[in-house]
Image: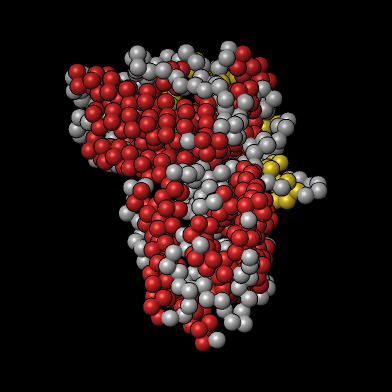
Amino acid sequence: MRLRPVEEFRVERDQLIETVAAQLGLGRRLALVAGTEDGTACRVVYVFLGSAGERAEVSLRVPRDDAWVPSLAGLSYQAGRFERELHDLYGIVAHDHPQPYRLVRHAHWPTGFYPLLDAAVTPSAFDAKVGFPFMEVAGKGVYEIPVGPVHAGLIEPGHFRFSVVGETIVRMYQRLYFVHRGVEKLFIGREVSDGVELAERISGDTAIGHNLAYLMAVEDAVGIEIGPRAALIRALLLELERLYNHIADLGALANDAGFGIANSHAGRLRETLLRHNALLTGHRLLRGALHLGGAELLAEPDLPLVASVAAEVAELAEIATSHSLVANRLNTTAVLPTDQAQRLGVLGYVARGSGVAIDARADQPFVDLGPEFRVVTRLDGDVRARFDVRAEEVAVSAKLVADLAGRIAAAPIEAAKRLPLLTHTVAGLGVVEAWRGTLVHRVEVGPGGVLKRVKVVDPSFLTWPGLPVALNDVIVPDFPLANKSFNCSYAGNDL
Amino acid sequence: MIDSVVVIVVHLVFALAITPVLIGVMRTVRARLEGRVGGGIVQPWRDVIKLFAKEPLRAPGSSPVLTWAPLLLMASSLVLCALIPLVSTLPLAGVPGELFVVVSVLLLGTVALAMLGLEAGTAFGGMGSSRHMVFTALVEPTVLLSIYALSVPAGTSALAAIVRSRRDDLSSLLNPVSILAIAALIVVVIAETGRLPVDNPATHLELTMVHEAMILESGGRDLGWLEFGSWLRLTALLGLTVNLAVPWAVAGDASWTALLVGVAATTVKLVAAAALLAAVEVFLAKLRLFRVPELLAGSFVLAFLSVSASYLVF
């Protein structure tokens, strides 16, 4: 399946808002904002994705020593967050931003340190003395619960500040970016084939998602068109990644409601799939399975095994949700209403649980998934809806795996495509429905196949803001359930 | 007097020896039913020995509460085990084995834990303590009422005498008073010892914790006392409940044969009850926090009905 070419717009500052408004007016969403440095100028690229394969890029050049862009926060909530990120990493200011606060940078970063600039030098000392002020909720009986960034369980670091009355959460502020590793900076200067190992380590549980988005972006940039077999194998691996992660989440959700037996069985089923992954690709978490210009499997997928796992998951989900105590914990907890989900631009199962049918497999397909594919949605927007979406997606994915495996067996083996000789800088876009939601990479490849810029947007970046909104009227002991049902990536978000 | 000392010593040694094993049985049963191997029956013993060998780390600026609250909990639990007729129903000379005394000693441990939770000044400790006290406010009256209902036919509020009269008059076991009171007691035991569906002892989620939240700041020996002290409460309460429900073979005096039989019988009963409790837990999930008081209020109603019935029946 051919991807639609990207519509490109080059604008000046005074045309930006108008152009972006026109794009949003077409029903497209802002999926990525990337800053780039070209010598003395900075370029800001806004990527829009439509629901029928449309892709558009609006780019704006601003001089390095007068780096500001008009803020789009009034047009789209996502834009406001992208602009804050842009400011923290590039020092490009968004004028008239309604929330001109830091997002990525922690208070102890030295003033004027913008890590993604070419000239940025890692400071010798970070001044850790500066605090991080939180908005304090005042009033009778309001108290604060600070949680993290180090938690009791084996989870990633994030700080949550709850303002609570009794047991009811009044306000929750999340402070992330504790695992900022400078991934985007690490890409710069690598050869495209060396970017693979980095891409699949951006978020450990999304190895295929990030790797595939990266490869598709590179192939889009340099003009490699992969064969049908490779595309099918990539789609298959993407579903296998979705399967094992959704199963882990289903178990963890039941476990957080105190129903440990479901988690034990989910763990067993996940392990079965991980061993199957190792058989297919040589790696349990599917690392190293994809490479530039192609994809190949080490063995044929064991379809009866995948089908039996899916059947057991369906039974497990049924047992959990028909248990009155578990159902009581999941139902009506942490509701994210549909209009909020749309306005915040959340992605993946969170959006689909709130009735927003957004799925890159349907919106931006790179392979025809056939009649078995459908976008699973629920309307309630509560923890139960997100649980059910996952459970049903497991069933859909298992059918897709069977269908894709049959088509792979029938497709002739093809040689991997080679990287053509590059003489100038090219840019490309990769859009993939990873298990957490739509994942977008935008790469710029310079002469000799050297990466000049890689911008990564994990779905978690857009989904995290949904969590505090969903906590309206939720009690403190239900927060772990709400958080687990979102299960946003910290590493993928913090980069 | 000598007999009383013998009984107290037997009670304490018995409780100390069996408690970690009891916890081990519960964890193992749960693990096996969930398809896991589990750490084994003696793992809690290993944990406790490990903890006692470690020096406690206390936060700078913390008050002596951090030191004495674990000891107070342990001490209160030991007194509880000595007073409750676990093995023998011999009335203890010079020591009041009264219902009200026992509940007060129970409360002493509860308060020590709550103080400990507040001591560290962290949000989790305070959260755990406040939830714990909410539950306690509903649990303690239920303990009082349900045992009080059983004391009416016995004509005494001394626990040993109640158990003895129930053992001697088996017809008193199967009547509405007894069944309602035992049902209320079982709920109370679950709540008081932090088991599902009230609290999840296996959770790592700070925000949902009750018991675990209060002991987060303790470590080493302090934590050892806290763990052992809490487990002893389980032994004491569960032991009291099983001996009230099935009072067979509880020793009536301090003779060695009777005590041996009593120890064997109580061991069997406790292990069976603990295994049953753990098995039921597998099928339970944790209640939403605000529904726990509903469960506890329900058990209070059972206890209340039991008291009312006891005046009608006897």
Q: Nearer the viewer, residue B268 or A389?
A: B268
Say left or right for B313 vs B186: right
Q: Position of residue B132 (x, y in %)?
A: 64, 56
Q: Decide if residue A249 is on the left or right side of residue A61.
A: left
Kindly indicate the quadrant of the structure image that contains residue A421: top left
Residue located at (61% from left, 13% from top): A25
On the image, the x and y values in percent for residue B305 come to 64, 48
**Front-lying residue, A461 or A273:** A273
Residue at 41% of width from left, 50% of height from top? B279
Q: Measured along the vertical axis of the image, is residue B126 above or below residue A445?
A: below
Q: Is residue B93 above or below residue B225?
A: below
Q: Is residue A29 visible to us here?
A: yes
Query: Quadrant of the rendered structure where residue A28 is?
Result: top right
What colour scheme has been applied to the protein in the rendered image? secondary structure
Query: Residue A16 location in percent, x, y?
Result: 64, 20
**Residue at the image position 48 percent from the left and 78 percent from the top:** B253
Q: Residue furthest right?
A: A140
